[in-house]
């Protein structure tokens, strides 16, 4: 039975068939005879002229008369008979008495009348439809559908029945029923050919009715065959059907069949997308087909045959120089990726003939062009992903293929410069592959191949042995690789927008294996050049390059190889000039990353490197030039531009120089992007205005306010004038508004270039240390206390100095810790201590040094709070501000290290300052914990200090813990009164009596104990006074007695007042 062509089907569907009747052959029109005959006999379907033309055309078909007879039956009676037959069959099925012998006797078909023929075919289909067996695995037998002589007439009967009885004989249901018969697909196509408007609905119904998905079932195979035939009628349905099938995972055989109906480009694109987008059912189906050794009709064989045809056409289109045609390059790239995808996702096994043919495509040469470069890179990666292209060949063919591959790879190396000059080079990829073969980094090579092919590839290491030998022994050795890598031009304007594999990837790979150092190839100049050619957003490969280079510059033993680090002179040149220059932001950030990484890896292996005596360090002069804090703040603010470097840089900075991390007062993004009008104030004009500020402050204040609103770049430019003004405004006559504004600008500059600013400020404020350096301040932070004494009474100046002090204390601590971690443990000549004990002793010594340094700082700070001789009212006002700053500073130090608080108080300080510290330092409450220990000291002065401290703490914090410690203090004093010599005891109580009064006032329950103690002290003083009968009225005993008496009188007055109230 002939099937309808796509041309006839489309003409019938769009209504142009009637005008093309004489263009089409008799064979073309035969499948739609039922429709044509029906249109010729039914009035009103066509205009008279068209109907006459149709009748004339039908005269060529003798069968038309038989069709007219089939159209002339009583369809109302037929409808009634079929419904009765269907009802009887349904009743039998419900009662369980039905058999598989359904419908009328098919043997009557040849001798039956038209009415009976309709009853036989339609009745049989209706009865079969009631069975609804979608798991049928054997074809149903029915003579009219199985006999080739009756098949066409049975199809005509079905078409006429559907047209005349559409409610009873539904097209979609009839199509599903016809799948049960061997010739069902052809009959369904015949039915749809006569009802073209039903194509979409029938296709959707057949897809939706596939509930089992078992492609081994007969009915499923029939469904696939039917859908393939239907989609040939209208190829536009292929795309949406493929989307539906791939999303649902249905019928992988149908998916492959539909793809095979597409052209070469669409076939490769759709199949590649299906394999790589996670179509697990399709991959599993193809893998199963490969394991079964399926026949040529299987889906995998269909794909292999189609791919071979495409490859053969492309290969045969080569020119005389074995170069692929430019028109086939894009298709060839897709075919190569498809071959690799079939190997990765469908476990493709090649036959020797396929390996020879497909290998010919891999080794084809390409013209110099971007598409040619893409083809060559894809060819190389396909070869690595599918080494079976070489292994599947046998005997002479294998040797020929190996020679062919060597010739192709040699051509790649020879043509590398030609491709590079055109700006579309594959050299980086080829170099990376060679590097990874030499270092046997198959996993990293897999990542490389995956990124080129666009899907994940797992390379079989064992099968790559022969290809690896070709690379390492026949093509290029490791020394040649390093020389080629060092000679590759750097990538200009390298950023995250630069795609593909770049020289930086190759160099990074070689650095990780220390190949440059091993073969003595200098790479530092190349690294520096690439750093200078980097721009925003930073390429993700640059941090990896910097880290690998920094690691390779550290030598861990005398025998190990190490690269030479970046030249300090070039780094100084990079950081010279404007520290905020935008065009140098990325190179400076990358250079800072290298310096921090170099220090970090140097510290990690410091002891081994020190033992080898090969440790290199950059000078302090270089570090002082680097605006570390500004660069860190820049990276944090512009996260998008510096995303690739941000994490590593912040981690390294926190580890190597935590004191340079941006502070809370770091310049905010709003400040950096200030919308205020830019101004141009020269350092000279600002210095002149500040010099004249004593007599004419308005001009200086105006300039400083303009600077506060200006971009920070302008403030950094006048840093020298600001520092000079800090020294000039120490004059007591300098206006406070000028000093405050000047200090504000100083703090802004501090957030960008702290080390440079601190060094300049220290030189300006310390006349005796006018040549002090940043390095000296790190070694001894106490140098800042040698500043001009006027700084100690100027709150704005002192605040700046305290910020410097905090910075250098942190830097000094970090430096000591680093020295401890990196300095090797020297030999113990006595061999009395194990290495761990020596290490612990070193740590104790370091903590002792840090404690001594910080306690000295606290003592000097507290000394600033003392009242000085000659302080007038304005001096006392300034003193209160200074005390507030000092207390805040000491509080931060106590919070950072609570042990420091204990150390300072065991050293003691002026008793007059206890009230200041307790009131101004919130963390002083922790001193309650060690007051009992301080009372137990043998030094009387420390005991006196402890009593005074406890009294002030009780007055500030009247809590339960303070009460218990106050009682303990009174008990200790009672004991001391009876144990200490009378002279020492009376001298001590002459100082602590006011503190005892505070105990009784804060905690009334202790008043009786205090009174008892004072009575005993008074009695002892009187006895001592009586013993010294000739003592003067100004003796210490008499003063003590009067102090106690005065205390009792005051207490009695307070008690009387309280009683009266």
Image (cartoon, grey):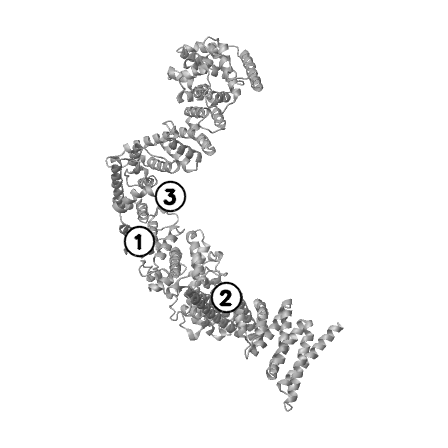
**Quarter of the image containing the N terminus?**
top left
Residue on which disc 2 sits: 741
Label annotation for residue 416: none
Looking at the image, tell me whether mark 1 or mark 2 is earlier in sequence order.
1
Looking at the image, tell me whether mark 3 or mark 1 is earlier in sequence order.
3
Are discs 1 and 2 less than 8 Å apart at CB? no
Looking at the image, tell me whether mark 3 or mark 2 is earlier in sequence order.
3
Q: Residue furthest right?
A: 1060
Asked if 280 appears above or below 168 in the picture, the reply is below
Q: Is residue 557 visible?
A: yes
Distance from the alpha carbon under mark 3 to that under mark 1: 25 Å
Q: At which x and y percent is residue 814?
A: 44, 65
Q: Secondary structure at mark 1?
A: helix
Q: Secondary structure at mark 2?
A: helix
Horizontal relation, residue 127 to residue 520: left or right: right
Which residue lies at the image location 32% right of the left edge and 33% below the top edge? 351
Q: Nearer the viewer, mark 3 or mark 1?
A: 1
**Mark 3 neighbour density, 10 Å: few (under 14) some (14–19) many (20 or more):** some
Q: Residue furthest bottom?
A: 1030
Q: Secondary structure at mark 3?
A: helix
Asked if 318 appears above or below 422 in the picture, the reply is above
Nearest the viewer among 835 and 89 is 835
Residue on which disc 3 sits: 451
Label annotation for residue 515: 1
Which residue lies at the image location 40% right of the left edge and 32% below the top edge? 288
Q: Nearer the viewer, mark 1 or mark 2?
A: 1
Distance from the alpha carbon under mark 1 to that under mark 2: 57 Å
**Mark 1 neighbour density, 10 Å: few (under 14) some (14–19) many (20 or more):** many
Which residue lies at the image location 67% right of the left edge and 81% below the top edge? 1016
Q: At which x and y percent is residue 666?
A: 48, 60
């Amino acid at each position: 039975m002939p099937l309808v062509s796509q041309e006839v089907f489309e003409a019938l569907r769009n209504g142009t068939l009637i005008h093309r009747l004489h263009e089409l052959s008799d064979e073309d029109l035969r499948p739609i005879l039922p429709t044509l005959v029906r249109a010729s006999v039914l009035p009103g379907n066509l205009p008279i002229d068209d109907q006459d033309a149709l009748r004339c055309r039908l005269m060529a078909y003798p069968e038309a008369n038989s069709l007219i007879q089939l159209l002339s039956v009583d369809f109302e009676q037929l409808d009634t008979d079929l419904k009765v037959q269907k009802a009887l069959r349904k009743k039998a099925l419900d009662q369980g008495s039905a058999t598989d012998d359904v419908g009328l006797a098919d043997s009557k078909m040849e001798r039956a009348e038209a009415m009976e023929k309709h009853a036989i075919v339609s009745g049989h289909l209706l009865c079969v439809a009631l069975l609804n067996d979608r798991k049928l695995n054997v074809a149903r037998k029915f003579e009219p559908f199985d006999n080739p002589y009756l098949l066409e007439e049975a199809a005509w009967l079905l078409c006429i029945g559907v047209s005349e009885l559409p409610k009873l004989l539904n097209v979609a249901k009839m199509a599903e029923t016809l799948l049960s018969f061997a010739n069902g697909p052809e009959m369904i196509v015949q039915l749809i050919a006569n009802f073209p408007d039903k194509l979409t609905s029938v296709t959707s119904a057949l897809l939706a009715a596939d509930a089992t998905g078992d492609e081994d079932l007969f009915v499923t195979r029939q469904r696939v065959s039917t859908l393939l035939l239907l989609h040939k009628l209208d190829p536009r349905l292929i795309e949406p059907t493929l989307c539906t099938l791939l999303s649902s995972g249905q019928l992988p055989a149908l998916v492959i069949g539909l793809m095979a109906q597409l052209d070469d480009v669409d076939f490769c694109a759709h199949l590649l997308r299906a394999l790589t987008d996670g179509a697990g059912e399709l991959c599993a189906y193809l893998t199963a087909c490969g394991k079964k050794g399926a026949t040529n009709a299987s889906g995998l064989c269909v794909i292999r045959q189609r791919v071979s045809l495409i490859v053969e056409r492309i290969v045969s289109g080569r020119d005389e120089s074995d170069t692929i045609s430019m028109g086939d390059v894009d298709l060839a790239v897709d075919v190569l990726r498809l071959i690799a995808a079939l190997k990765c996702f469908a476990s493709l096994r090649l036959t020797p003939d396929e390996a020879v043919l497909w290998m010919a495509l891999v080794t084809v040469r390409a013209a110099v062009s971007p598409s040619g470069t893409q083809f060559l890179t894809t060819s190389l990666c396909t070869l690595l992903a599918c080494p079976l292209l070489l292994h599947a060949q046998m005997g002479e063919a294998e040797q020929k293929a190996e020679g062919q591959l060597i010739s192709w790879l040699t051509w790649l190396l020879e043509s590398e410069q030609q491709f590079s000059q055109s700006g579309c080079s594959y050299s980086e990829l080829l170099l990376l592959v060679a590097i990874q073969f030499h270092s046997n980094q198959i996993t990293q090579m897999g990542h490389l191949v995956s990124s080129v092919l666009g899907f994940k590839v797992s390379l079989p290491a064992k099968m790559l042995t022969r290809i690896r030998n070709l690379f390492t022994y026949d093509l290029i050795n490791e020394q040649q690789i390093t020389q080629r890598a060092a000679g590759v031009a750097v990538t200009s304007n390298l950023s995250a927008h630069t795609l593909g594999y770049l020289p930086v990837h190759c160099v990074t790979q070689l650095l990780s294996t220390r190949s440059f150092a091993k073969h003595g190839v200098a790479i530092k100049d190349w690294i520096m050049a690439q750093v200078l050619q980097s721009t925003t957003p930073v390429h993700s490969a640059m941090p990896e390059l910097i880290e690998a280079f920094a690691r390779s510059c550290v030598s861990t033993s005398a025998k190990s190889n190490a690269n030479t680090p970046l030249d300090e002179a070039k780094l100084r040149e990079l950081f010279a000039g404007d520290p905020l220059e935008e065009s140098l932001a990325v190179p400076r950030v990358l250079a800072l990353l290298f310096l921090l990484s170099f220090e970090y890896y140097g510290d990690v292996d410091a002891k081994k490197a020190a033992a080898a005596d090969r440790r290199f360090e950059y000078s302090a002069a270089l570090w002082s030039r680097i605006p570390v804090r500004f660069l860190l703040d820049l990276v944090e603010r512009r996260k998008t531009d510096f995303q690739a470097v941000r994490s590593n840089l912040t981690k390294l900075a926190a580890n190597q120089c935590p004191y340079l991390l941006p502070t809370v007062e770091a310049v905010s993004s709003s400040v950096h992007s200030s919308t205020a009008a830019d101004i141009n104030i020269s350092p000279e004009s600002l210095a002149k205005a500040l010099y004249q500020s004593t007599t004419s402050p308005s001009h200086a204040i105006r300039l400083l306010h303009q600077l506060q609103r200006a971009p920070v770049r302008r403030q950094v430019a006048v840093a020298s004038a600001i520092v000079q003004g800090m020294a000039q405004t120490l004059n007591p006559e300098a206006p406070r508004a000028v000093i405050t504004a000047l200090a504000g600008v100083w703090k802004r500059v501090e957030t960008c270039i702290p080390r440079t600013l601190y060094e300049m400020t220290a030189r300006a404020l310390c006349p005796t240390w006018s040549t002090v350096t940043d390095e000296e301040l790190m070694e001894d932070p106490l140098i800042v206390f040698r500043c001009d004494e006027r700084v100690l009474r100027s709150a704005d100046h002192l605040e700046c100095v305290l910020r410097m002090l905090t910075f250098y204390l942190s830097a000094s601590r970090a430096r000591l810790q680093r020295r401890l971690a990196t300095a090797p443990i020297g030999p113990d000549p006595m061999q009395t201590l194990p290495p761990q004990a020596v290490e612990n002793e070193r740590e104790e010594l370091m903590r002792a040094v840090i404690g001594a340094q910080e306690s000295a700082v606290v003592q000097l700070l507290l000394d600033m709070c003392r009242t000085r001789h000659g302080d007038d009212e304005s001096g006392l006002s300034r003193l209160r501000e200074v005390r507030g700053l000092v207390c805040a500073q000491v509080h931060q130090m106590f919070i950072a290290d609570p042990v420091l608080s204990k150390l300072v108080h065991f050293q003691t300080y002026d008793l007059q300052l206890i009230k200041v510290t307790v009131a101004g330092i919130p963390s002083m409450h922790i001193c309650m914990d060690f007051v009992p220990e301080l009372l137990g000291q043998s030094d009387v002065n420390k005991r006196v200090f402890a009593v005074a401290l406890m009294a002030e703490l009780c007055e500030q914090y009247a809590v339960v813990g303070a009460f218990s410690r106050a009682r303990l203090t009174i008990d200790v004093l009672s004991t001391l009164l009876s144990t200490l010599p009378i002279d020492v005891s009376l001298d001590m109580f002459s100082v602590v009596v006011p503190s005892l009064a505070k105990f009784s006032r804060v905690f009334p329950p202790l008043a009786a104990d205090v009174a008892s103690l004072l009575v005993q002290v008074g009695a002892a003083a009187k006895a001592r006074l009586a013993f010294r009968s000739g003592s003067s009225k100004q003796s210490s005993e008499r003063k003590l007695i009067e102090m106690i008496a005065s205390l009792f009188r005051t207490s009695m007055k307070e008690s009387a007042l309280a009683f009266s109230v």
